Amino acid sequence: MFRALGKSKIAFVLAILFGISLFFFKGGSRYSNFFNSDTVVATVSGTPISTTKFNRTMKMNINKFNQMLGKPITKDEIRAFQIHSLALGALVNDAVFENEYDKMNLRIDETIIAKKTQEKIPQLYDKNNQLNETYLNTFLKQQQLKIEDVVQIIDFETRDAYINDAFFKINYPEYFANKISKYNQHQRKIIHIELPLSKVDIENTIQEQSSNMNTELQNFYDKNINQYMSKESRNIEYILIDKKSFASMFNTSDFEIKEYYDSNKDLYYENEKRSFTQFNFKSITEAKNFQSTIKDFDTKQILEYSLENNIRFKKFQNIESNQILEVIATPLFKLNLNEKSNIIETSIDKNIILLHSISPSKQLKLEDVKEDIKKTITSLETNNYFLEIINQISEKVLNGESLNEIANKFNFKIEIIKNLTKDYKKYDVSQENIYLNLISSAFSANKDFVSDIVTIDENYAYLFNVQEIDFSSPLIFNSIRERILKDWKIAKKIEKIKLEIEENKININFVTKLSQKYQLELKENLIDKSSNALPRDFINNIFEAEKNNNVQSIDNNTVHIANITQILIKDIDKNAVDIKLIENDLRRSFGQEIMKNKKISTNDSLINAIIEQY
């Protein structure tokens, strides 16, 4: 227990303010492992980004997209919308600053952190200022965080607020604000083509190199040797600890259920819920036309009209205000039964809401929640036992005990995987998260070294030992010559088209001639900086170039080539320009500068495993 607590002095101060009972009531060690965010999705020069924080941020972003799109998004859509990158990017940005604050030795007194915690989460204490242990459990579970995460978040926010107030809160002059608004809102007209690399002819190059092709390929092989390495493989042994396997050890009496209910009635107070239909429109004009048409319709007529006219809508059942975006929840919970809202604008679309039913808030009866309470108590007891076992195993690892000794002590089974590689796939889909996590850890460990406990999620943990390592080595040239030749051809095609574009950088007819040469569709687009009609890297290149310039970007063996035909900058009403703080830009510039000296590592296997859960 104290091994875990020793990670943070703040933990002890929090323990005092939370009440000593936090760590010493019956089963008190249940909390000790909350300080171990053992699995991380990324590190920034040693500052970790825990899996729990990433998971929580991901789900918050996913919920917003679900609401805006009017349907649950799939794992493929998560990747398409780059939601995981948005979540990770935000956390990495914070971690960059956090690491810098640590490097600067910028510290906040532990008592301040503890007081800030109490200010932000006052429900942690009852009227006698004693820790509400049940609420703490519920809060951590609902927020999908560990105590260590909560402490870290508040510690960072406190330091960050201090730096922002001291250095970054500066207003833009009105003149500059106007210029910035014009630039941010300006548009560019382009003509562009999508050129498949397969259409690029390099026969002349091949003929020129035919007499010394082996030498050319050998040089290409040597220069790109990292692409032609064998897969490192490892033999490992591991113990998987499944919390669910402990559940059968605990029984809950009716007396315990009633006692829990009487002590925690506030947890079984059901908030008001509303069922409604949300109609979605791409433009304000469409929304206004719909609003005008259905003005005197009843609910049935509105739904029939929507179906007949292909109006996009989604029905939601029994939704609480905190389950949806605030911009939707605020007007929704002001509507009367069968009433329609005004047009609601979000960053993605326009919406009109039709309220169908209202379920008033109420105190749930014991008999209605008995099974739920039973599951909660069993879950708490199982969780306590799970954490106690993990703490005991951690101590034995520290004492140098082998995997066999630990397995015998706790009656665990040792599993063995031979020839484990980073792309190992010989497992059941239901165990993908476990294996991806295990692979990531195993390839970061040394041989013959029993790992500490690694927590995958709230249900699984493991420890392992690497028995053998077969290190990666260069593949024999002759055995992969055809693969090298194929890669060389692709590289030469890219080299040729890039050179051709660079030589014709200011040739306004170049893109048109290419479209004719390769018989490609010549497209015309009007885009702004936030457009998603083209690859992001391509759009960035377009907005960094000058009028009449030709720019390119390569994506999935396709070369995107454009000529910037017009740059359209509109006049902006001075009264409509926000005189915003320069804070975000100063902070961004500072962040970009300090990021140059940070080493950022991501656990891509673990991130992919998390996405696969959706």
Image: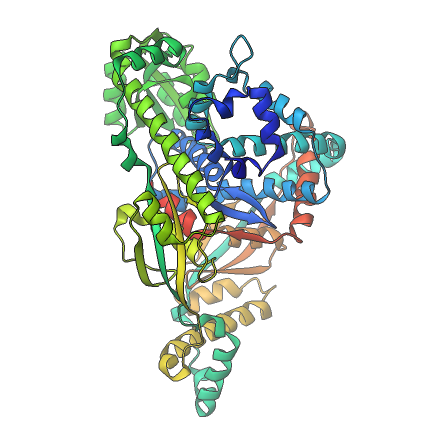
| Quadrant showing the C terminus | top left
Which residue is depicted at the point 25% across and 31% down? 248
Which residue is depicted at the point 66% across and 53% down? 596
Q: Measured from the top left, where is residue 246 in percent x and y?
A: 29, 34
Task: From this view, report whether residue 13 is shown above or below residue 373.
Answer: below
| Viewer-closest of 325 and 523 | 325
Which quadrant of the structure image shows residue 328?
top left
Which residue is depicted at the point 35% across and 21% down? 290
Q: Measured from the top left, where is residue 252 in percent x and y?
A: 27, 20
Task: From this view, report whether residue 600 is shown above or below residue 446.
Answer: above
Task: From this view, report whether residue 202 is shown above or below residue 113.
Answer: below
Q: Measured from the top left, where is residue 599 in percent x and y?
A: 60, 54
Tally of marks = 0
Side (left or right) of 356 relative to 525: left
| Viewer-closest of 308 and 537 | 537
Q: In this view of the protein, can residue 528 be seen by the observer?
A: no
Q: In this view of the protein, can residue 290 be seen by the observer?
A: yes
Q: Measured from the top left, where is residue 353 in percent x and y?
A: 37, 18
Which quadrant of the structure image shows residue 577?
top right
Which quadrant of the structure image shows residue 378?
top left
Residue positioned most to the bottom: 211
Task: From this view, report whether residue 567 is shown above or below residue 385.
Answer: below
Side (left or right) of 597 relative to 213: right
| Viewer-closest of 232 and 563 | 232
